[in-house]
Amino acid sequence: MAEACQVARKQDLPPPGGYKPIPYKRLPAKQLFSGYTMFAGFLGITAVSSYLYYLTSKKITKQEIEMRSAKMAIYPMLLAERDREFLKQLRKNRDAEAELMRDVPGWEVGTYYGERVYKNLPPDTLVQPIFHEYYAHCNPTDWFQRAYIKLRS
Amino acid sequence: MVLTADIHLPEESELTVEEINLSTATLRAGSFHLGKYCEQANNEFMLCRFEENDPRKCINEGKAVTACSLEFFRKVKKACLAEFNQYTNCIDKIKPLYTFSIIINIVFSCRKTQGVFDKCMLENLNLERPPFGYFCEARVHETKRPKPPVEEKAVYPDATPGLPENAEKHPARFGSRFYWMTE
């Protein structure tokens, strides 16, 4: 025990010449632009991009007008064809209803036992039936395709 | 159904005419010249359709439109088939660009083939491509069809009679007739 105490002890001391100074000084990031330059840059980029946006929007408007022209030119033709097809289908629907309700006593086509839907309109007025009525007598698959696929695509 | 037996619907034989059996690309390729060629029939039909608001009353005008369009495409087939097919093919194969839900770039990406087609149409059929935005302009159309009668305002016999012309008008109670300011 006594021998152990006789080991030469060395005190922990600073290195010769002392410790290095502690680096407490602030080291800010390198400044590439000053504040005024950044404001000027923002304004410049905004101006240039606004001009480019203006040019593009003008171009797109022109394209839209041309596209709309093309559509409007063929619209009467498509509408004429659609009208004929629509009237044919209306007739088919009415015939189908007459056939379906043939055995029901007191049933009149297009009415609820003689009570009209639109009482104040003249009798020969064509009221376009709603979607579900128009597709009432068709295959449900066609109805589904028209309602959920064609109209949304 | 709302279709009663009183409503006159035309027979199927009245409505059956030769339809235009063409694809979208074909119609789009020929649209400008078609609109110019059939302008009279188209205007007549559209005026009738929007004035009458009844498809039954404009069947004959519609048939005229279809006949005119058929005639146009037959003429194109006779005169400029190769150029037209080239242009149609370009429009068909072009990859459309969808911008703001409007398909753009269909008509604009085929300017070269369009130029060839336009030149052929001008030389053979003497049909010029209408200027920019021609079909978007408002137009006035003269027609021989009589104007449909305007629905008159309904007159009710038991309506409350209004004040007579020479009714006495008292001064306003609070100095103003602006009731929302005073009362």
Image (cartoon, coloured by chain):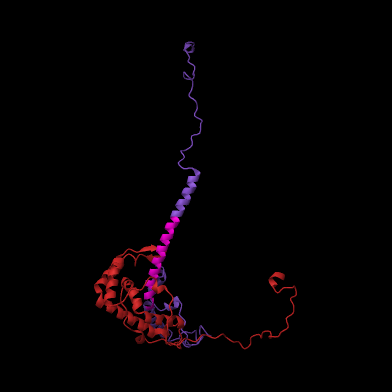
Chain colours: A purple, B red
For the point 72% across and 70% down, the residue is: B182
Q: Nearer the viewer, residue B51 or B59?
A: B51
Q: Quadrant of residue B28?
A: bottom left
Q: Nearer the viewer, residue A21 or B16?
A: A21
Q: Nearer the viewer, residue B145 or A15?
A: B145
Q: Is residue B73 left or right of residue B48?
A: left
Is residue A54 something that shows in the picture? yes
Is residue A143 something that shows in the picture? no
Q: Which residues are magenta?
A: A49-76
Vertical relation: B10 (above or below) A130:
below
Vertical relation: A104 (above or below) A52:
below
Q: Quadrant of residue B123?
A: bottom left
Q: Main secondary structure of the magenta part?
A: helix
* Residue A24: image location, x then y, percent: 51, 30
For the point 48% across and 48% down, the residue is: A40
Residue B4: in magenta span: no
Q: Quadrant of residue B41?
A: bottom left
Which quadrant: the C terminus of chain A?
Answer: bottom left
* Residue B7: image location, x then y, percent: 45, 87
* Residue A113: image location, x then y, percent: 50, 86
